[in-house]
Amino acid sequence: MPPPVLVTGGAGFIGSALVDRLLAEGRHVDVVDNFSTGSLANLATARSTAAAGALKIHQLDVRAEEMDELLARREPSIVYHLAVLAPGQGIVQAAESVAGTVNLLEAARRNGVAKVVVALPAVSLYGDVPPRELPVKEGRTFETTALDSVLARAVCDLLAVYRSEHQLEYSALALTNVYGPRQRETGGVIASFRASAQRGDAVDLHGDGRQTRDFLFIDDAVDALVRAGPKGGGLLINIGTGTQTSIRDLAERLGVETKLSIKPAGPARFAVSSVRARIHLQWESWTTLEDGLSQL
């Protein structure tokens, strides 16, 4: 039997979908989650279909000292770290999640974990990119000074240090706006708009609604994470569709009424190039926005 894999944030939106996929492929999975935003309900399918002993759930924060003991006892070959810079976190929570990443990397180093795969929000990492440079590539120089961008870059730097000094392999996946079933209302714009449409509420369009984002369906994101397990060592890899969709157009597709808001809108336009993912992971997105929305 192959060694287990461990998923931090495994009871969350992306994490639980990854757990389902790993179990379907016959892997044994340890889920670590403090259940601050994750839910056992997200793991209902996994708990009902997993073979005996294939799924273990640990209510634990990645910042806890017990992470070292857990990795020593379970000996995972790969750690998928999804409990960092989650959508909707305040800046203090985001900084604490980076501290948790350090604790996890230390535990992984001490206990001989072969590889860590980390998911990062691409918008936070790159910030406001000039339209002429879109879809943005991984080699672009980071220029933004926003706090969430600084924290995302800090995670990338930490991974590089642990690889060079401690031979801890990693892949960092910069995910665009992931959406799909199980996403909580505050977890993304599509989930928020969909909930408003169901209630018949009008939604606030931050800015003028013309800002664009790169929307990635959950199954495509999970496929990239799984492929990064044995591939893409030492790389930052963009995971997205490369297609820009305006927030105003998204609202029309979901049939929600809109009203303008004075709240800041974030980057004016955004999408990523996934050429590196095609080369190193043999991955590309296959779900169109229309097909993905139809599955909600």
Image: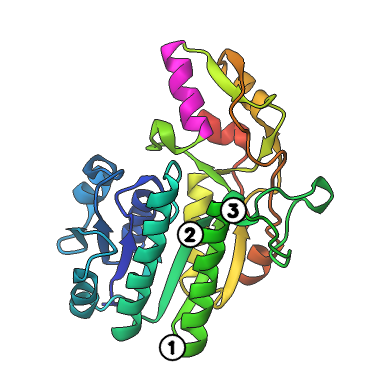
What is the three-letter code of the residue carrying label 3? Ala
What is the three-letter code of the residue carrying label 1? His
Residue 281 visible in the current orientation: no
Q: CA distance from mark 1 to mark 3?
A: 26 Å
Residue 286 percent across, percent down from the top left: 61, 48
Circle 1 packing at 10 Å, graded few (<14), some (14-19), many (20+), is: few
Instruction: Residue at 28% x, 64% y: name it.
Output: 63
Element under disc 2: strand
Between 115 and 1, the residue placed more toward the observer is: 115
Numbered circle sitting on residue 119:
2
Sequence-first disc among 1 and 2 = 2
Numbered circle sitting on residue 55:
none
Q: CA distance from mark 1 to mark 2?
A: 21 Å
Q: Hey, which residue is sitting farthest left in the picture?
A: 52
Sequence-first disc among 1 and 3 = 3
Instruction: Residue at 38% x, 50% y: name it.
Output: 93
Instruction: Residue at 38% x, 58% y: name it.
Output: 97
Residue 229 percent across, percent down from the top left: 46, 71
Residue 262 vs 79, above or below: the answer is above
Residue 275 percent across, percent down from the top left: 71, 62
Element under disc 3: helix
Rendering colour mode: rainbow
- State the residue position of label 1: 166
Between 282 and 194, the residue placed more toward the observer is: 194
Residue 217 vs 32, above or below: the answer is above
State the image quarter where residue 37 is shown: top left
Between 170 and 292, the residue placed more toward the observer is: 170
Numbered circle sitting on residue 122:
3
Magenta stretch: dominant SS?
helix
Q: Range of the magenta residues?
A: 189-200
What is the three-letter code of the residue carrying label 2? Ala
Within the magenta stretch, is there residue 39?
no
